Image: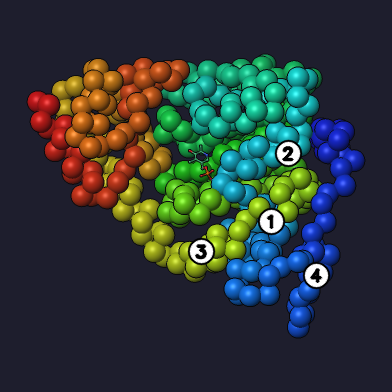
Amino acid sequence: MNLNKLLRKNIQTLKPYSSARDEYTGKAMVYLDANENPFNQPYNRYPDPLQREVKEKISVIKNIAANQIFLGNGSDEPIDLLIRAFCEPGVDNIVTIDPTYGMYQVAADISGVELCKVSLNKNFDLDTAKIIAKTNINSKLIFLCSPNNPTGNSLNKEAILNIVKSFKGIVIIDEAYIDFAPEKSLLPQLNSFENLVILQTFSKAWGVAGIRLGMAFASPEIINILNKIKYPYNINILTQQKAMELLSKKEEVKSWVNQIITERKKMAELLGKFPFVLKIYPSDTNFLLVKMHDANGIYNYLVDEGIIVRDRSKVHLCENSLRITIGTSNENEILINALKQLI
Ligand SMILES: *Cc1c(COP(=O)(O)O)cnc(C)c1O
């Protein structure tokens, strides 16, 4: 793979913004270089533009070199940056699966880049040959989401790796739900493929969707490109502090994940007993996709009861299906009791 050939010309030649904190990275007694207010410590200071402390901690936990980690304002930031770095508007295209996470489409649309979708089969499985057949000379990126949203299943690992091996562009695997899956992350294989990008997030297993922190793992060369085009201070001080705190509470996070998985199994069993439930799809995530008679009617009934789930009925292959996030055992019980009123 020739990374420079894949990259847009204007990004290749871009001279990135150089901030005060880029130009002097050491410790000093007095900082008078960034036009900061001297009062109101510590929030008066700009944050570390490369989030070095946070990356060091993630590096240890994930066993990935710090220079192979990019942190973004949610995973949505690296999704957008990858498109902007590699896809020439009106010329290049992206290939992904259908159905999948909606942000790939939105980010492609905003950049004026075509997104070509390949349908999963009825079991929500991936067909390697169909994906590769959909690519052409202008295909720069392939987005795969595993475990997939909204279907909940993990894509076949061999199929994913075959795509990574045969595609000449960059393959992005979105592992937002990997902590809930029995399948292992592809992270240990990261250094076997120079065209592989893996996305993970603090929004699901780590329980901090509110701080907006997403991770991209890739070769140092790809990470450098993302660093070059991101906003200089894309991760604020509060987010970096909260992330440091959570990264020291790995065991607690693990116990949340285990509780959610236990609840997911319980909910699949309980929901399966309702006469209007037609199918519970297998889930490696923190949600269940449930096919039912009159999903829209049940959705509206639940809204009236003060319970909000996601109606995915309009999504390809998800007709009459609700996506139900796994809550606390108390929240899940409230949902089950509301549904019992219907029979
Ligand atoms: C929730 C989710 C994310 C997380 O997005 P953030 O911007 O990190 O909150 C990423 N990908 C998928 C498929 C998701 O469902």
Where disc 1 sits, the SS reads loop
Q: Would residue 56 be visible to someone looking at this image?
A: no
Q: Is residue 175 left or right of residue 303?
A: right
The foreground one among 309 and 223 is 309
Amino acid type at circle 2 is Asn
- N-terminal of the pair, mark 2 or mark 3, is 2
**Which residue is disc 2 drawn over?**
195
Of badges 3 and 4, nearer the viewer stands: 4
Marks 3/1: CA distance?
16 Å
343 displayed left or right of 14: left
Query: Which callout, 2 or 1, points to the residue nearer the camera?
Result: 1
Which residue, given by chain and number where applicable, does mark 3 sit on? 242
Mark 1 CB in 8 Å range of ligand 1?
Answer: no
Q: Is residue 77 above or below residue 97?
A: below
Assess disc 2: are there few (<14), some (14-19) or many (≥20) residues with their C-alpha within 10 Å of its C-alpha: many
- Verify CB contact (< 8 Å) between mark 2 and mark 3: no
Amino acid residing under circle 1: Tyr
**Residue 22 on image: x %, y %:** 80, 62
Front-most of residues 37 and 309: 37
How far is the residue under mark 1 from the one under mark 4?
16 Å
Mark before the other along the chain sequence, 3 or 1? 1
| Residue at numbered disc 1 | 233
